[in-house]
Image: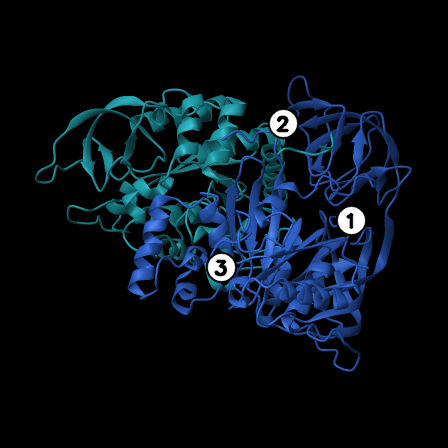
Chain colours: A blue, B cyan
Amino acid sequence: MKINNNQLLRFTTAGSVDDGKSTLIGRLLYDSKSIFEDQLEAIENTSRQRGHEGVDLALFTDGLRDEREQGITIDVAYRYFTTPKRKFIIADTPGHIQYTRNMVTGASTANAAIILIDARHGVIEQTKRHAFIASLLNIPHIIVCINKMDLVDFNEEVYNDIIKQFEAFSSKYIVTDIRFIPISALLGDNVVHRSENMSWYNGGALLHTLETIHISSDYNKVDARLPVQTVLRPQRDGFLDYRGYAGRVASGLLRKGDAVTVLPSGFTSIIDSIQGPSGELDEAFAPMSVSITLKDDIDIGRGDMIVRTTNIPETSQDIEAWLCWLHNNSAKPRAKYTIRHTSNEQKAMIKEVLFKININTLAHNTEDKDLNMNDICKVLIRTTQPLMVDSYRENRSTGSFILVDENTNETVAAGMIV
Amino acid sequence: MSKYFLNYLDELESEAIYVLREVWAQFQNPVILFSGGKDSIVLTHLAKKAFYPSKIPFALMHVDTGHNFPETIKFRDDLVSELDARLIVGLVQESIDQGRVAEEQGKHATRNALQITTLLDTIEAHKIDCAIGGGRRDEEKARAKERFFSHRDDFGQWDPKNQRPELWNIFNGKHFEGEHFRVFPISNWTEMDVWNYIKREQIEIPSLYIAHEREVVWRNDSWIPNSEFLTLHDNEKIETKKIRFRTLGDITITGGIESEADSLEKIVNEVSAMRQTERGNRTDDKRSENAMEDRKKQGYF
């Protein structure tokens, strides 16, 4: 299969236990011929042992022993498939409220989110939760799949009603691109092949949509940012004075000859060379890993950020952000955490919890300030040293951070800068 | 398509380089787990790129079961000298001689599970705080849940139900003394991606991956190579076949497939038409549905 010039699309799937999410993924993989014979054989055996009729495609996505025994997804699992048009990475996440943190994790790297709705039940509380998380994590494309159309006689009105219900509440969020597709994951209608049972639907099947969504503009191409991961000093013949500032371009475009500023020091210089994975380049863009050299000898280390002088991020010790609490240990008032933002690391304190959001009703709660696992809230954070930040809406790389508990080393929160 | 967009292989390459640089920045004494297989070879190739023009800053660590393909060991030694890297070898035979582990008995005996002890002992002896591996999430269902940065407690154990969440590309490698991390920079690559990359970059690989004539025995639905470690069962006979290997493990358990693919081009075509997973020929994975999960929890690769 030749896909050498093709793009990579990362998407996440949200749905609850009975929405048919695992069946949908199984169907995508099966109909796109991404399931191998020995995997299929294993699923057939298990289906038979459990007395299921036919092959239960949902079994394909169950990973760990506990999950297989309980028939639910506990953790994020990653699946891969390729078509002649694109390579796909699926972050398969559980949809139940107690797994909000896993949904957030899966959504953090996604270009697109599939939200599943059971055609028999229409928009329910958890649909709103899934849409809210997709919007909070700023996923550029949302595909709402109205599933189990076979159980409502492939009725167009049911489908149109659900679209109306969905749009009624989603218009409150900023979501750039929403599409709707009526499907039957069980029977395969509009998943890989267009449905013969729903001639009233003029759009493409799900796979066609995934293959053609325009994702080239998903990266921020305006704000040139290079967080420095490490400094390369070969100190060998031919490279005695070489100092390469290595990192992955977070956003924007960096060109040889560009005037740049190094933050937080504020020193300025000119890009002398850009080393890409396969040799020297004239320009670099996200998400390329490069190392650059500058015309001037400046003291630069991990945690610094190289930006274009004409476009500089905000430098601040006080940050307003959305937080999703990820850990069993609740947040303690004024407790200190390590904040990891790009390649930078500082001490930080949650100064104030502004409000917590009820993710089913989206109501703000300003009374209860305890942060427990799966809670989403807006907070004020104070750091010991300034961070170079952009708003998460503008820049997913320089607008995101995590908090790490210094006593346990565990990652306890995910943050999105307002 | 916009000019400012990477194709999928370039994106995977940049992602892996980013992860390797994070390892270097976050750990004191990281090593690359080098098996001589294609995944660890690709990993080493990526490490070369990540730190160019510096030389690769990681030692290569090999857990040697003693049941090797001779080609693998020669390949390993040639690569180490070309990179001017340090080689750390953990010998399973030594673990057996010291009584740390007992050789499995019976006709299905392998040294596969014994590697866990040798691996963990070597990590401890050399005070290694991060072992970089070529594991991929598409290989096996337990691996589909693996993180890029995967924590191991001070017994080397993996706790799959209590993993650190991994958001965006911010990796948390913080750990206490005695604990270590396994890091998988090519998590998001599939077997096909690895082969396409090897072909594109013209990376040298052991000749075992390329179709060649070899003495083999038909066992567990694949061709097991003849070697000094092979005990013939009843009704088994040695034949000569043109075969190649899709993965390289111990010579005693790695099955080959009949193949005419004697060039990278042909291998890529063959792999894209494959209807069996590459681990389908590994008897270590066939022991039970939970075989990989159970070994990984104990500290396996």
Q: Is residue B83 left or right of residue B213?
A: right
Q: Secondary structure at mark 1?
A: loop
- Chain assignment, label 1: A
Q: CA distance from mark 3 to mark 2?
A: 43 Å
**In the drawing, what numbered circle is on residue A22?**
3
Q: CA distance from mark 1 to mark 2?
A: 29 Å
Name the residue at 32% across, 43% down.
B280
Q: Nearer the viewer, residue B55 or B286?
A: B286
Name the residue at 39% across, 59% down.
A56
Q: Nearer the viewer, residue B189 or B259?
A: B259
Residue at mark 1? A395
In the rendered image, residue B38, in percent from the top left (x then y), is placed at: 43, 32
Q: Mark 3 packing: few (<14 Cα in 10 Å), some, or many (20+)? A: many
Please identify, in this view, whether the residue under mark 3 or under mark 2 is nearer the observer: 3
Do callouts 1 and 2 point to residues on the same chain? Answer: no
In the rendered image, residue A302, in percent from the top left (x then y), is placed at: 72, 42
Residue at mark 2? B52
